[in-house]
Image (cartoon, rainbow, N blue to C red):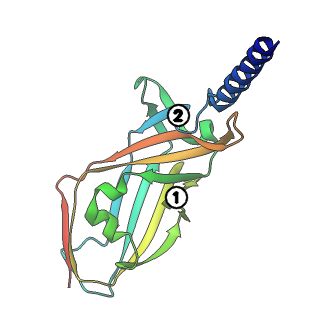
Amino acid sequence: MIKNSLKSFCYLVSFVFVLGCMSCIPVLDPEPCDTPINTSVGVNDTFSIVPLNAVYNVGDKITVSFVVDNLAKLQSDSSKDFNIFEESGENIAIIYSGLENNQDLAYLISSPTNSIKINYGEEHNFGYALKYHPDLNKYVLELEVTFLTERVYTLEDFSFTLLLGNRPNNSGDNCRYYEHVSSIQINPSISFEVL
């Protein structure tokens, strides 16, 4: 009798233990937030500084523009065109990563190093977001930068990643699900000094 009770107790403890372990196994979401549905690559993306001088003074203003063409190529198949706005339906493209890799560019467009006013685009948790400009059929971020500190800047080729679109995954999280990689070629590099 005691053997049967002990045996039943062991089965019950084992069952509860296995059940507890099974509840700890994560449910794998087939659409996790870190996997975009499509990744596009920029073809005609541009960056500009106006006016571009060799020397500025503290207090001078420039306009810094990032322009991403709405028409891109799929990263997985560069022969296929990808219309970013049509596919994502998003007016806003968040700069997710990349600008921090170019220290001078990061300083140029950050406060308190400089005073920044957004002429077109938006501020976002990650920093800045480009806004779709329907007349240009491009995503644009235009910043008015007022120099507050003396510094020498050298800007070279850089890349950045944009995230677009919201769609809840199976866990109920709203995920950014389109990714666009923009590579800006600056040849020759841009150098200037703020006195």
Label 2 sits on what residue type?
Thr
Query: Residue 189 location, x and y as percent?
Result: 18, 58
- 3D distance between C-alphas at marks 1 and 2: 20 Å
- Residue 133 vs 74, above or below: the answer is below
Number of labelled discs? 2
- Residue at mark 1: 129
Q: Residues within 10 Å of mark 1 (few under 14, many from 20)?
A: many
Quadrant housing residue 182: top left
Quarter of the image where the N terminus is located? top right
Query: Residue 51 location, x and y as percent?
Result: 31, 73
- Residue at mark 2: 35
First along the sequence among labels 1 and 2: 2
Query: Residue 6 location, x and y as percent?
Result: 75, 18
Residue at the far front in the pictured view: 2
Mark 1: secondary structure: strand
Along the horizontal axis of the image, is 104 left or right of 86?
Answer: left
Mark 2: secondary structure: loop
